[in-house]
Amino acid sequence: MLATARHLYNGKAAAPEPTFNPNYRYLRVVTGGQAVFMVLGYIDQRPEGAVEVWYSGSGEVVRLLDGRLVGTTGLSTDWREVRLSDPPGWSQADARTYVRERDMMPGYRFGIRDRIVQTPIAPPPQVALAGTAASSLRWYEERSTSRPASAALPPARFGVSQAGGTPRVVYSEQCISNDLCMSFEQWTPSSPAPVAAASAGT
């Protein structure tokens, strides 16, 4: 569905921007200064909510639940399974706390427990946003303390759009490990420029 010529996270040159199909939804993923595009394969309806399942052209999979990373497949480090305990929504004006449990591969690290604090923050000065202005979004940071402590991750940041009256994460920066961090941006391809009609008699 999506022509991505390079492996998503192996440090090679970024894939060229694909020819977008208006029938699909896209996710712009940036890691290590390189951008690739993923396509929404399907929505997995679970008791905890709708999980978006995104695919790269070479088979990597990213799963997002309300903007939060809840699973990956095919990366150098994968979150095979993630369980969130009553995560707060994106309309809070004060700090909120919830618990995440995750299973990681390789290494068979199961049941890593993160206590996460979500806090509203000012728009950050430097982000990898390409399709909208950071100042137009409401921002949150999520910091965690982990058991075991060796599994602790850098803070995550989320940019939330209020368009349409329903808060929706359109951009985030999240880490799977200390050396595998990425940003995710809901991507709306620009419309192609109209082709001028040929002059009569040409």
Image: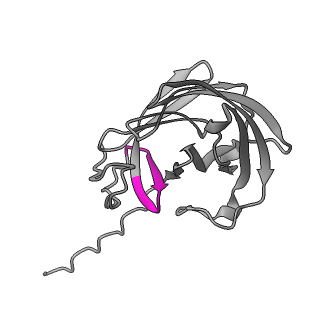
Query: On the picture, is 169 further left or further right than 18?
Result: right
Q: Residue 146 lies in what quarter of the image?
A: top right
Query: In screen coordinates, is 191 left or right of 90?
Result: left
Q: Position of residue 159 (x, y in %)?
A: 66, 52
Q: Which residues are magenta?
A: 23-36
Image height of 59 relative to 163, above or below? above
Residue 15 x %, y %: 32, 58
Depicted 53 relative to depicted 20: above or below: above
Q: Residue at x 75, y 33 (%)?
A: 88
Q: Nearer the viewer, residue 27 or 98?
A: 98
Identify the residue at image location x=69%, y=56%: 137
For the N terminus, which image quadrant? top left
Near-viewer residue (51 or 195):
51
Horizontally, residue 40 falls left or right of residue 82, namely left
Name, please, the residue furthest toward the top: 47
Quarter of the figure with residue 200: bottom left
Give the residue drawn at x 60%, y 62%: 127
